[in-house]
Amino acid sequence: MKLSVNKRLDEIVKCYFPNSQKYRLIKELSNNEFLIRTEKGQFVAKEYAPTLSKDRLLFFEWLQNSTNAQMGISPQVVKTRDGNLNVNIGGLNYDLTEFVECKRFRRENVQNRSKFFYEIGSFVGKLHKTFSEIESAGQNIMRSQLYIPPESPSHMIRLLKSYKKARIEENWAEIVKVKIDIVNSYPNGLNQFNKLPKKIVHGDLYMKNILFNKSQKVIGLIDFVQAGMFFRCYEVVRALIQINRFFQNIDINPKHITSYMRGYLQYTYLDEDEVLNMLDFYIYVQASDTSFLDIKTILDGGRENNEYAKYRFNSLQLLYKNRHLLCKAICNAK
């Protein structure tokens, strides 16, 4: 296996640095990511699944470079000697991205959480402002890979039937039933939210994809693979939830919501429909989502995956229960 990896890395290095024959494999970051060092610096060579189309790969790499260049953050995807952003070796696509040293700080080191929520809200606002500027330039923007089942809750009713056949424990069926009830509490379903604006979103704004320095200042953003056109207000709430999860909280402090939204609204305008519907829309999408609830994941995903599925469900229940209070906190930021 190691010889195979080294051979592929040899080819990757030659494509990006034709005059450089020397590199060193520093670390295997995961089964498809490798940290290497050349005379030019340190880089992450990443292998992408064959299911990812060439067009999507080129799109999100271009968006990452355009966004990070405009915002003055890192990292950049490196161009090959032929001017491409990725190469195909043995039927698999690879790219090379500059390596950025960042600090994975502990949540206990955040002294002022309200300020931290405000600063991340500001970063998300700046990001969406940059996305709007890129979109207005007239480039062809792909759809995000974020997905809402259009037939919800029909797919969950089918899932319940499959649980019964597979003799899945009743506690999982109870989770799905509650999610169905939440979806049904929005009588117009997805039609209620389809009027909300779609803009470019990152698609996966959570703490591991935001790079920080030792002073807890944002210095970079990675993993644009799900980026594209989607409902912007959904990402605003999703990023907020992920920050809350970083602090290992299920419930959200309304004060932190207001701080986050004030930071965001400094840079990006949300129309009235977005503000009034953003939390309910997030709840609807999460209630419709059956990630981590399919039979294979329940049976083979292990304890960690199952605990995460239950965490998401508990978080959803609290959001739904407290949505009026939390909506008020959002509106207080305006």
Image (cartoon, rainbow, N blue to C red):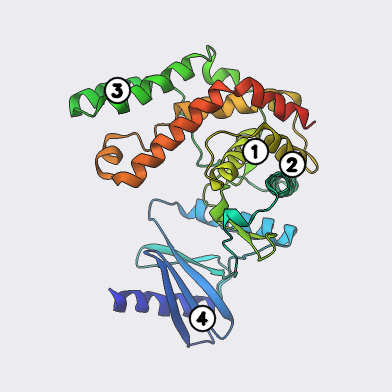
Q: Earlier in the sequence, mark 3 or mark 1?
A: 3
Give the label, 4 or 1, closer to the camera: 1
Alpha-carbon distance for marks 2 and 4?
A: 37 Å
Identified by mark 1, the residue type is: Val
Q: Which residue is mark 1?
A: 236
Which residue is identified by label 2?
264
> Upstream in the sequence, badge 3 or badge 4?
4
Numbered circle sitting on residue 160? 3
Residue identifier under label 4: 37
In terms of sequence position, does the residue under pointer 2 or pointer 1 come before the other?
1
The residue positioned 39% from the left and 51% from the top of the image is 51
Q: Amino acid at mark 2?
A: Tyr
Tell me the amino acid under the disc marked 4.
Arg
| Vertical relation: 82 (above or below) 284 | below
Indicate the secondary structure of the residue bearing disc 4.
strand
Q: Residue at x 23, y 29 (%)?
A: 168
Q: Secondary structure at mark 1?
A: helix
Task: Tell me whether circle 2 and circle 3 mark residues in contact (CB < 8 Å).
Answer: no
Q: Quadrant of the C terminus?
A: top right
Q: Is residue 152 visible?
A: no
**Disc 2 + disc 4, Cβ < 8 Å:** no
